[in-house]
Amino acid sequence: MHHQWLLLAACFWVIFMFMVASKFITLTFKDPDVYGVKQEPLMLTAMTKVEKIHVPEEKCWPEEFQPTGNVISEDLMHQQLIHVERTELLRNVCRDAALRNLSHTTISKFVLDRIFVCDKHKILFCQTPKVGNTQWKKVLIVLNGAFSSIEEIPENIVHDHEKNGLPRLSSFSDSEIKKRLNLYFKFFIVRDPFERLISAFKDKFVHNPRFEPWYRHEIAPGIIQKYRKNRTETRGLQFEDFVRYLGDPNHRWLDVQFGDHIIHWVTYVELCAPCEITYSVIGHHETLEDDAPYILKKAGIDHLVSYPTIPPGITVYNKTKVERYFSGISKRDIRRLYARFEGDFKLFGYREPDFLLK
């Protein structure tokens, strides 16, 4: 009899423990955030938190990247994450009060003149010279229907705004401007700020392939007269003169004389107002091989047009070239130049040049 009672008690104990264990398991899977610390659901909880850090709630994944049951390529997901991070960096810098004077500007006519419109496909493109803009203009010219293919567009037409069929945003009424800024896909391209200045200097004052004599005969003499230290020097504009002009806090009195020609070397902030206008994508010249197809896809036009073939190595940042151009320039002049372009460096994630830190 005694053994029977012991057996019965043992059975009740086993049943009791089974009920407690079942209740614990049920609670664990109902509330992984609470119990995930000790149980396997911790892996799912940790992954969720990482996603929230890199993809803030206010940034919803674009429709084409929403889960649909279809497999999304790793490359596409990687590209999306890169651009989300770029956007988050931009917003953080725009909110930095210490950089406000370098990151903010008004949406003036000067800015609106830089933005080209494709109404047919609801696209706005902000022009940032010396960053491969000619090719993007060709893409928009085809989309607007002026030519059926990029190969058909004569080079002299691309920059002739009377003939290329690309209206500027400034040509619309205020209400039409606001509507397009709110509804259209908007993008522009950036490049390491100092390398872009070197490209502008070479293109306008050294090679001048489009034969624009006013750069050498009007703008260069104005810079030399104001900023050249050695008055006995008779050579044309030197990069040192150019840097001294751009880094001068009082450069604007010359800018006014030079007019719209300054678009080739003013900051991205002055050109496109990235803290005032919410751009859909900001591409980087250094990763254009990946960014160009991504932009076309995001704009919904990848089935209509392709970005022109990019010659191998042309978009790679040339650190050696940049260091060579700045090697003979005083630290004072370089620091003043950086002070003007610091907003561009910070907004778009470009590192301060090593030669400034030495």
Image (spheres, rainbow, N blue to C red):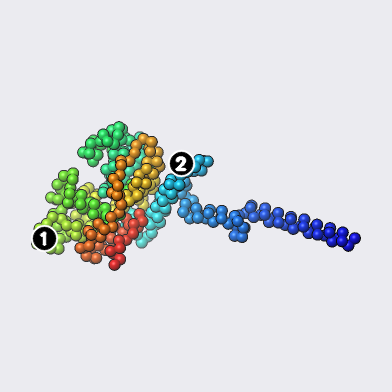
Q: Secondary structure at mark 2?
A: helix
Residue 200 placement (x, y as % from top left): 23, 51
Residue type, mark 2 in image = Glu
Residue 92 falls in which quadrant of the image? bottom left
Q: Residue at x 21, y 53 (%)?
A: 201
- Whether residue 261 is visible, yes or no, is yes
Mark 2 and mark 1: span between their CA atoms? 59 Å
Q: Which quadrant: the C terminus?
A: bottom left
Q: Nearer the viewer, residue 184 or 319?
A: 319
Q: Residue furthest right?
A: 1
Residue 340 placement (x, y as % from top left): 28, 59
To which residue does mark 2 refer? 64
Circle 1 packing at 10 Å, graded few (<14), some (14-19), many (20+), is few
Using the image, tell me which numbered label, if any, was put on residue 222: none
Q: Nearer the viewer, residue 186 or 99?
A: 186
To which residue does mark 1 refer? 233
